[in-house]
Image (cartoon, coloured by chain):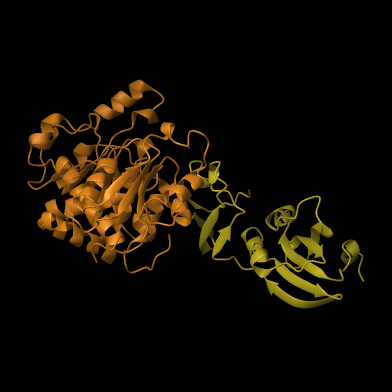
Chain colours: A yellow, B orange
């Protein structure tokens, strides 16, 4: 095995998120609400050489099979990310993330006067109007945004 | 409140964009029926209660809803000024909505935050009518504007000029979306700093609706069938001198009208006005803004009646 591949060891069980755009690994953890201190064992590689992408990030979450709906939110910041579900060192499921129709609770509405930005504990909700280029509309105030700001 | 699409019974009225053109036409048709035979409608909402929650000042919207409910034989309960309620004690907006939705069959809400009405509709047991939220939407004002244009001018093929504060005016935002459903030519007349938000223009572009923008009413007034005037909001200007300079140049006077307008031009205004239409214009054949407020009661009767099942 090449030295490059040993940077992050294979995991026995869990979820591997590969082909993350370089520099987005920390945001991926944010989207997945994996914060320190976390219960999961998480390994991360940033700026790893990639034949397809030049440079990429990788995130491995051990002993946790992340749900598809949860993982698809990653597509907002890493369009080409691939998901590998691992069991007993074998990849049992592999797919590319795709942007969901609605995004709940992870993005801030850019409209400062939106009810979601008031002290009301309203969970933000955006309708994905276009995937490429990305265009989201706040379900509450109707503001449209193409840039994502995480809560 | 969740209700079946296709019928207005039990529906929330949050944004004009939630309604199809057919549904809007139906509301206008029911309004026309009410106007023609107002007396026979008393009692249709007997036993029904409208609760009124206004977190911002209002004269017309509040009182025309009350008037509409009484005309149909229903009753109203009003939360009153927030200073006298539990909101002052720190009760959350969501708790207030949950509580008051137990007291009434339908609720009309005005709130300073954009999206407050949509949020309220998710937690209320009864239909919510948006009486204006933030700078967002004011759908019942839009419906009465459409009714006035239909009755006093024409909806299809009209050339409509919208003048004033197009950036922050929620009545404008709702109206523009509604007019876009009717393929109407629109001209937006405003100071550059108060022009229509880019997002709304993008939405019009997506729908392939053409529009013009200018900053001088004199340049376009002769081509208009409808002139919709809105208040230039003083509080938006950091410098009072700047406000006075701008507001003066957007004042509709008899002189401007005598400079050449279409014979059947109509002038509308959601009111209150603060000087943007000279009182001398009130007596001209073009003025329809006080009639517009009268139509507001009829249209709100239609909305209440359709939501509560008094009309079909």
Q: Residue furthest front?
A: B47
Is A24 in front, or is B153?
B153
Residue at the outermost top position: B241
* Quarter occupied by the N terminus of chain B: bottom left
Q: Is residue B148 above or below residue B169?
A: below
Q: Quadrant of residue B238?
A: top left
Q: Is residue B23 visible?
A: yes
Q: Position of residue B197 (x, y in %)?
A: 40, 45
Image location of residue A126, percent across then percent down: 53, 57
- In this view, the residue in front, B66 or B142, is B66
> Is residue B157 in view?
no
Give whichever of B87, B183 is nearer the camera.
B87
Q: Residue at x 68, y 65 (%)?
A: A71
Q: Is residue B94 left or right of residue B141?
A: right
Q: What residue is at 32 percent from the left and 35 percent from the top?
A: B191
Left or right of B106: which side holds A61? right
Residue at image location 44% in from the left, 36% down from the top? B85
User: Residue B282 location, x and y as percent?
Assistant: 12, 35
Left or right for A92, reference B23: right
Name the spot of residue B154 as percent of width and height, x first: 15, 56
């Amino acid at each position: 095995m090449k030295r490059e591949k040993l940077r992050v060891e294979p995991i026995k069980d869990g979820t591997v998120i590969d082909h993350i755009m370089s520099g987005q690994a920390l945001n991926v953890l944010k989207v997945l609400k994996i914060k320190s201190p976390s219960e999961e064992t998480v390994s991360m590689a940033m700026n790893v050489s990639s034949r397809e992408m030049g440079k990429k990030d990788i995130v491995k979450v051990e002993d946790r099979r992340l749900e598809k709906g949860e993982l698809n939110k990653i597509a907002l910041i890493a369009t080409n990310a691939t998901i590998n579900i691992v069991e007993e060192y074998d990849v049992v499921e592999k797919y590319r993330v795709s942007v969901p129709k609605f995004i709940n609770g992870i993005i801030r509405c850019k409209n400062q006067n939106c009810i979601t930005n008031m002290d009301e504990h309203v969970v933000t909700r955006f309708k994905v109007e276009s995937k490429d280029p990305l265009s989201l509309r706040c379900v509450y105030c109707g503001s449209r945004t193409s840039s994502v700001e995480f809560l | 409140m969740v209700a079946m699409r296709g019928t207005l019974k039990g529906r929330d009225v949050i944004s004009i964009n939630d309604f199809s053109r057919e549904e809007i036409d139906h509301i206008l048709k029911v309004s026309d029926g009410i106007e023609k035979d107002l007396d026979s409608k008393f009692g249709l909402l007997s036993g029904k209660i409208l609760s009124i929650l206004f977190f911002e000042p209002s004269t017309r919207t509040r009182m025309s809803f009350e008037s509409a409910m009484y005309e149909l034989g229903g009753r109203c309960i009003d939360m009153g000024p927030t200073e006298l309620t539990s909101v002052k004690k720190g009760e959350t907006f969501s708790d207030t909505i949950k509580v008051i939705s137990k007291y009434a069959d339908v609720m009309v809400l005005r709130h300073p935050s954009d999206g407050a009405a949509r949020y309220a509709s998710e937690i209320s047991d009864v239909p919510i009518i948006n009486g204006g939220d933030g700078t967002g939407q004011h759908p019942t004002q839009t419906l009465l504007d459409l009714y006035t244009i239909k009755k006093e001018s024409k909806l299809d093929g009209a050339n409509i000029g919208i003048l004033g504060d197009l950036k922050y005016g929620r009545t404008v935002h709702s109206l523009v979306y509604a007019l876009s459903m009717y393929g109407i030519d629109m001209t937006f007349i405003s100071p550059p700093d108060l022009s229509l938000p880019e997002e709304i223009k993008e939405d019009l572009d997506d729908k392939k609706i053409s529009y013009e923008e200018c900053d001088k009413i004199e340049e376009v007034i002769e081509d208009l069938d409808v002139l919709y005037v809105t208040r230039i909001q003083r509080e938006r200007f950091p410098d009072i001198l700047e406000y006075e300079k701008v507001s003066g140049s957007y004042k509709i006077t008899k002189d401007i009208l005598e400079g050449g307008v279409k014979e059947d031009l109509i002038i509308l205004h959601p009111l209150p006005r603060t000087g943007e239409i000279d009182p001398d214009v009130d007596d001209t054949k073009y003025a329809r803004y006080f009639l517009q407020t009268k139509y507001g009661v009829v249209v709100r009767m239609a909305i209440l009646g359709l939501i509560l099942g008094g009309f079909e």
